[in-house]
Image: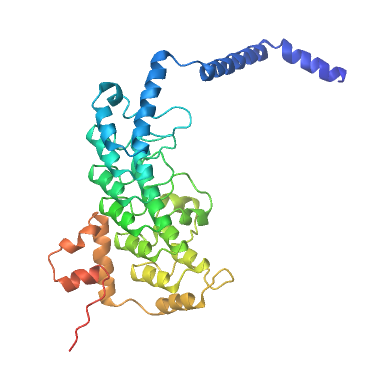
Amino acid sequence: MTLTNRNALRCLYEDHTFVYLVCYLFSVFAFAAGSMLKLRTAEEEKRSCEISQLRQAVLQNNDRLLDEMLCQEIYKKVINCRGGWGIAGTPLHAAVSKGHLSCLQVLLAHGAIIDCVDVKAQTPLFAAVRGKYLDCVLTLLKAGANPNGSSSNNCSPVLTAAREGDAEILKQLLKHGAEVNSRAKVLLWTSSARVSSGPLYLAAVYGHMECFKLLLLYGADPDYNCTDAKLLSSDKQPKTVLEMCLRHGCGVEYIQLLIDFGANVYLPTLIIEKSTKQNEAVELLLRERGNPKALTSQCRLAVRRHLRKINKINCIDQLEMPTSLINFLQHKAAPVTVL
């Protein structure tokens, strides 16, 4: 070590601020380590044992034993507690993650908090959707679970159902008021990533046509990433769902649906290039650009747009009008009359 370096090091150690900082950091680390290694008290040990016993009853799908346990105060007071090391969630999370409906019903009957979160900020509903347990999803929704999950979680039940292609679960979420234009909550920096955070895009690229149409029927905005003021402020040329479907080679039926549900066919600007994979889909888009929509289609879009604005898009079948018009508004094919 040179003399200059030694002098610099000596000055650094002689600086009282540096010494105080080192001592402070050492005390913080020592406190943290002590907290982590601290032995549990007898009361904490007993509480952990009770949580574990509740969890075991749930995992064994023993609803009768679970009910008997929760009639005792020592177990009821830990019904909403997470487990210890390696246990992410509450007994309610354990029940839905295994699809144990009877245990779920027992827990709810004894006052389990329906929207409690695990260490990943996932609600029991999110876990039920991820596990594809429709009966658990319905039970939670009917009991008042938030269909959007936790605001602290980056994902949502709708995004999960759209990605997994579970149309019936997705339908139930939307019927119970889930946000149809849900997106990942963490800021996504690239325009393509912003589009890919939406349920429409996920349903398309994973090939889930039924989910894709269902989202549109419940009011998903086909141009949602191009009408979001926050996104437009950071990206002046956002990629539309329509353009991303073309780039990823989604079937022409996806393009047709987007057009039918009012996608702006003039927004995609880079469609004829190497990144597009379907000439038929591109030709469809170009034809649509050259031919304005029929007046009936324009009227349908206007009615649906208004219903979406007042959050009544799922009430079309309650409108006082002929069944044929209701079917038209819901994009249902007209019945064929046999002469």
Relative height, residue 295 to residue 236 (above, below) = below
Residue drawn 43% across and 14% down? 41
In-image side of 149 versus 193 (left or right):
left
Where residue 322 sits: x, y (%)? 14, 71
Where residue 241 sits: x, y (%)? 44, 62
Which of the pair 339/302 is nearer the observer?
339
In-image side of 85 versus 106 (left or right):
right
Where residue 212 sits: x, y (%)? 38, 63
Relative height, residue 244 to residue 173 (above, below) = below
In-image side of 95 versus 336 (left or right):
right
Locate the C terminus and report the quarter of the image it occupies.
Answer: bottom left
Q: How many marks?
A: 0
The answer to whether residue 93 is visible is no
Relative height, residue 87 to residue 195 (above, below) = above
Quarter of the image holding residue 123?
top left
Quarter of the image holding residue 207?
bottom left
Which of the pair 162/12 is nearer the observer?
162
Residue at the limit of the structure toward the bottom, as seen here: 339
Residue at the limit of the structure toward the right, as seen here: 2
Locate the N terminus and report the quarter of the image it occupies.
Answer: top right
The answer to whether residue 37 is visible is yes
Q: How is the image coloured?
A: rainbow
Where residue 109 sits: x, y (%)? 22, 35
Residue drawn 27% across and 49% down? 138
Residue drawn 67% across and 12% down? 19
Residue drawn 45% across and 51% down? 231
